[in-house]
Image (cartoon, grey):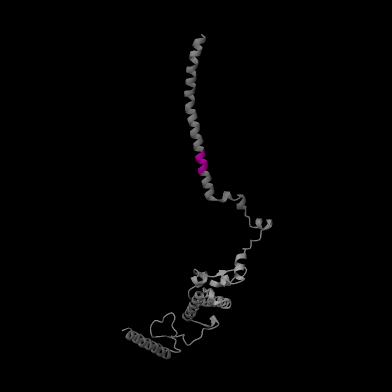
Amino acid sequence: MARNEEKAMSALNRWTAQKRDLERANNLGKSTYMGGALPASATFGPYAAKKRPKIASEVTTVRECEHWRSELVRGVAQKIKEIQNAALGEHRIRDLNDEINKDLREKGYWEDQIKALGGADYKAQAPKEVEIYGAELASHSGYKYFGAAKDLPGVRELFEATVVPEAPRKTRKQLFKNIQPDYYGWRDEEDGMLLLAEQEAEHEAVAKEVARWKAEMANRPAKKARKGQADEPKSKAEA
């Protein structure tokens, strides 16, 4: 039974391959492809017979720029997956890392061309996962190390010894250069909200003091009466 299933699968594979070759031959060089949706890894279609242009500015359509950018993204993702294997050897790992950085730079050129043609601005969006996997040295801006390349001889030491340079200290002249009168409070009278808050606080303080003064004045006659009552027994005793 298994033999019959294997024969059927083999025949299906041959038929699929023949159909793909026929579609590729019929659509070679055409600007549109009418054979249905193409898979991401298709080797046929409108751009199958074309080689990716070396200069992105020569392409004048957003659709073609998107195609070449997607091709680069897929290639970079595949190479990042491959470079995780430390058993590839130092030379192969270095070559892969160089190829990834080269493809990322080229992808940036295509993104610039897409934006210039009125397409999406990919650089303004969040970085893709294929880029955030890389580590960048502070002294080598623009070049990233991926996967096993981070542990190569000489590279690991650079990452361990990397120290973020301190910003140069500003002189007294630079510190006082941009100071405005607001820093010293010379323009507080021009701030309407601040004046309003000060008036409210002043009214509250005045009202509080007036209430305290009235309470003292109301209690003053009662104190005098109690003092007079306390002095009467003393005067009778002296008499």
**Most foreground residue, 119 or 221:** 119
Residue occupying the point 49% across, 20% down: 227
Quarter where residue 32 is shown: bottom left
Q: Relative to residue 192, is residue 30 depicted above or below? A: below
Q: Is residue 98 left or right of residue 48?
A: right
Report whether residue 146 is seen: no
Residue lying furthest left in this view? 1
Taking the image as shown, residue 45 lies to the left or right of residue 180, namely left
Q: Residue shown at 52%/41% (left/top)?
A: 202
Question: Extreme top residue here?
Answer: 239
Q: Residue at x 50, y 13 (%)?
A: 234
**Total numbered circles:** 0
Quadrant containing the N terminus in the rendered view: bottom left
Residue at image location 53% in from the left, 50% down from the top: 192
Residue 179's x, y, as percent?
Answer: 63, 55
Instruction: Using the image, determine if residue 210 lies above or below residue 51.
Output: above
Q: Main secondary structure of the magenta part?
A: helix
Q: Is residue 153 magenta?
A: no
Residue stretch in magenta: 200-205
Q: In terms of depth relative to the viewer, which is nearer, 3 or 62?
A: 3
The x and y percentages for residue 95 are: 57, 78
Q: Position of residue 159 (x, y in %)?
A: 60, 67
Give residue 37's quadrant in the image. bottom left
Observer able to see residue 234: yes
Image location of residue 218, percent across then percent down? 47, 28
Q: Is residue 105 above or below residue 239?
A: below
Between residue 151 and residue 235, name the one nearer to us: 151
